[in-house]
């Protein structure tokens, strides 16, 4: 499935909100019938944000959008952010820098390996300057001292937190939520997304109608301060008298972030791709769909529910993982 003549529709987006809303409003919603759904009277629609662009895929583009805009408005020519060797975020940032005329710096955890991961190989080929720092320094990534030193060495930059996790990031996802609401004219019951930092969940929940529920499937083993972070961001986007319309679901991390899949997850992944024809990424979307499928089997949703699942992209990460063929 390809997005009708829109493969490079993003190329036409000049960081204007109307443009993004228009692209977001054309993302296809694909009905998927999984085994778990038979006779349950539940409908699943997959929103194919993985198809939005071959290089700048999924939720990462939405999270970068307002950051790029603000950086341009404030006259920055350079963007800096943080990530690991397989980071969808750094990959998207490098692509965005190339497309929108920013130079980019990616600060990566660990030593530079003899051979770069495919992710970082792309990023470097697209012009991103890669800086490798020790794990200890990486832990200090939000400390003013480290940032000051980076500025001294590499020049002034607009800082985007790891994963694009800031309010501008959430604003882009809020727009996705608004586009979805318009596309379906409110005719759905809940929307699901995979959760890392939770920025996407907070934005999405604030974008859809407050009577609809946004469910976030966490891929992290420890919950840490995730719920608090989501709550804070959500409250910045939506008036305080609105009852929070999001839930964090924590039972489907399958061992934790980026870990080797247990056998049951590999099996689910293979079956899902075979039955739906939709490719998933190993870190995020496969766990969300496994979670959705399990909840359906547990009778979590009533008959007649119409559930939307956001395919948040990340398919570039398949190159570094044993995937179903
Ligand atoms: C980064 C990412 C997420 C998680 O987004 P957050 O806003 O950090 O919660 C989900 N899916 C994919 C494919 C991602 O790359």
Image: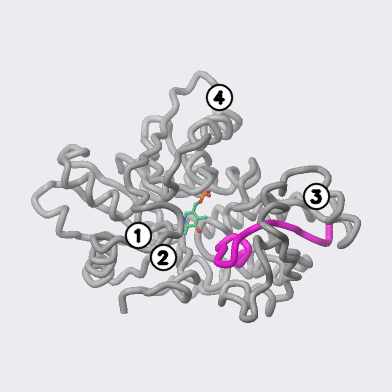
In contact (CB < 8 Å): disc 1 and disc 2: yes
First in sequence: mark 4 vs mark 3:
3
Q: Secondary structure at mark 4?
A: loop
Outermost residue, top direction? 241
Q: Secondary structure at mark 1?
A: helix
Please state, as top left, top right, bottom left or bottom right, where the C terminus lies in the image: bottom left
Residue interval drawn in magenta: 76-92
The residue positioned 69% from the left and 76% from the top of the image is 124
Mark 2 Cα-neighbour bin, 10 Å: few <14, some 14–19, many ≥20? many
Q: CA distance from mark 4 to mark 3?
A: 35 Å
First in sequence: mark 1 vs mark 2:
2
Q: CA distance from mark 1 to mark 3?
A: 35 Å
What residue is shown with label 3?
146
| Mark number displayed over residue 230 | none
Mark 3 Cα-neighbour bin, 10 Å: few <14, some 14–19, many ≥20? some
124 and 183: which is toward the camera: 124
What residue is shown with label 1?
286
First in sequence: mark 2 vs mark 3:
3
The residue positioned 76% from the left and 43% from the top of the image is 143
State whether residue 226 is above or below residue 148: above
The residue positioned 48% from the left and 33% from the top of the image is 227
Q: CA distance from mark 1 to mark 2?
A: 6 Å
Instruction: Point out residue 169 in the picture as x, y percentages from the top left corner.
Output: 61, 47
Name the side, left or right, on which 18 lies relative to 306. Answer: right
Q: Secondary structure at mark 3?
A: helix
What residue is shown with label 4?
239
| Mark number displayed over residue 281 | 2
For ligand 1, tell me if the residue under mark 2 lies within 8 Å.
yes
First in sequence: mark 2 vs mark 4:
4
């Amino acid at each position: 499935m390809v997005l009708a003549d829109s493969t490079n529709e993003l190329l036409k987006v000049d960081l204007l909100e109307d443009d993004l809303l228009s692209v977001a409003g054309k993302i296809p919603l694909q009905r998927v019938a999984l085994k778990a759904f038979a006779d349950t009277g539940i409908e699943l629609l997959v929103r194919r944000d993985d198809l939005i662009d071959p290089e700048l895929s999924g939720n990462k583009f939405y999270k970068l959008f307002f950051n790029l805009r603000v950086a341009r408005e404030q006259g920055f020519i350079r963007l800096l952010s943080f990530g690991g060797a397989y980071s969808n975020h750094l990959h998207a940032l490098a692509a965005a820098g190339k497309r929108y005329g920013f130079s980019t710096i990616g600060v990566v955890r660990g030593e530079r390996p003899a051979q770069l991961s495919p992710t970082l190989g792309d990023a470097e080929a697209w012009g991103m300057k890669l800086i490798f720092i020790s794990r200890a320094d990486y832990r200090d990534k939000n400390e003013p001292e480290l940032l000051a030193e980076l500025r001294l060495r590499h020049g002034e930059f607009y800082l985007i937190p790891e994963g694009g996790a800031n309010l501008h990031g959430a604003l882009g996802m809020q727009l996705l939520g608004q586009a979805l609401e318009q596309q379906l004219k409110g005719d759905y019951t809940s929307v699901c997304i995979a959760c890392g930092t939770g920025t996407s969940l907070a934005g999405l929940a604030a974008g859809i109608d407050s009577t609809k529920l946004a469910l976030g499937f966490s891929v992290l083993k420890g919950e840490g301060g995730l719920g608090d972070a989501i709550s804070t961001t959500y409250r910045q986007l939506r008036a305080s008298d609105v009852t929070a319309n999001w839930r964090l679901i924590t039972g489907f991390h399958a061992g934790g972030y980026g870990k080797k899949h247990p056998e049951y997850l590999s099996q689910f992944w293979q079956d899902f791709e075979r039955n739906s024809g939709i490719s998933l990424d190993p870190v995020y979307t496969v766990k969300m769909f496994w979670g959705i499928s399990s909840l359906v089997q547990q009778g979590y949703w009533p008959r007649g529910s119409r559930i939307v699942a956001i395919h948040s992209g990340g398919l570039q990460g398949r190159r570094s993982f044993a995937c179903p063929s």
